[in-house]
Image (cartoon, rainbow, N blue to C red):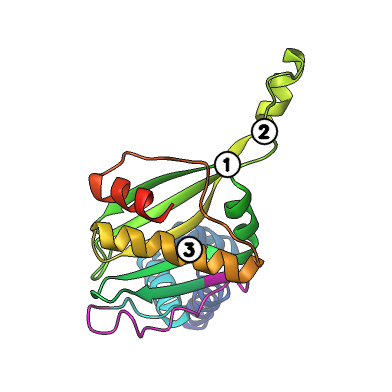
Amino acid sequence: MENFEKQECHKFIVDKAKENPQLTSNELYLKAELAFPNLEINQNNCKKAIYRARQDRYPPAPDTLNLAATDFSKTLFKDFHVFSKKSATGETIIFLALKSAYPQIADAEGIITDGTFKTRACFGQLYVMHATVGPQIQPDHDTSSYENQLRKNFTRPVGYCFMENRTQASYELMWESLKEELNAELKINWQGPEWILSDFEQAQKNAVKEVS
């Protein structure tokens, strides 16, 4: 009887992991504890189940040999869009964003950016974009309404770009590719935001001047 219950518990853990691979192993562990209060749950089994479920659901991390040809379309979000571009000199960027965020990027007065280095596989950095969202505060507004207006003015993450390196050519490729993507999807002539806030590296600064 105990062996049967252990088998049922194992099946429960595997099935729950497959249903929702976004669960943490601790969340899965707590679910298993509630479902099988008389068993001692092995948390390591929960970790393995989540890991395997994610490996089955998502494509493998690319390497330098297959970066440009990798299919990045496998995703849990139907609205999620991925496009990759390669320059004549060999730099490759992969841009990820929700298509529903495209209008917010195009309408944003400003974009705030930052990067994390040495991410995964062959990538040199993950470059993150936040766009300003909400109505702008006009200088002639009644000051009593500023607090409410400010609550509507915030930023949200709108795009992520994997880059092989941090050269000026890579930054230019990223901004040019984003412009082409937005203009094609939204049928507009977007040339970039009014301002960009970042801890500018010289290569990034030169690229923004070049493409804006």
Q: Which residues are magenta?
A: 63-81
Main SS of residues in magenta: loop
Q: How many marks?
A: 3
Q: Is residue 207 above or below residue 81?
A: above
Give whichever of discs 3 and 1 has the lower sequence position: 1
- Identify the amino acid type marked 3: Leu
Q: Is residue 183 magenta?
A: no
Nearer to us in this view, 13 or 150:
150
Q: Between marks 2 and 3, how big is the CA–CA gap?
A: 24 Å
Give whichever of discs 1 and 2 has the lower sequence position: 1
Assess whether mark 3 and mark 2 are in contact (beta carbons under 8 angstroms).
Answer: no
The tag on residue 136 is 2
Q: Disc 3 marks which residue?
A: 178
Residue 48 visible at all: yes
Dot 2: within a 10 Å radius of its alpha carbon, few (fewer than 14), some, or many (20 or more) residues? few
Q: Is residue 72 magenta?
A: yes
Assess whether mark 2 and mark 1 are in contact (beta carbons under 8 angstroms).
Answer: yes
Q: Residue at x 67, y 33 (%)?
A: 136
Q: Is 128 on the left-hand or right-hand side of 152?
A: left
Residue 208: x %, y % from top left: 37, 50
The tag on residue 157 is none
Q: Between marks 3 and 1, how big is the CA–CA gap?
A: 16 Å
Q: Disc 1 marks which residue?
A: 109
Residue 40 visible at all: no
Assess whether mark 1 and mark 3 are in contact (beta carbons under 8 angstroms).
Answer: no
- Identify the amino acid type marked 2: Gln
Q: Is 105 on the left-hand or right-hand side of 162?
A: right
Q: Between marks 1 and 2, how big is the CA–CA gap?
A: 9 Å
Give whichever of discs 2 and 3 has the lower sequence position: 2
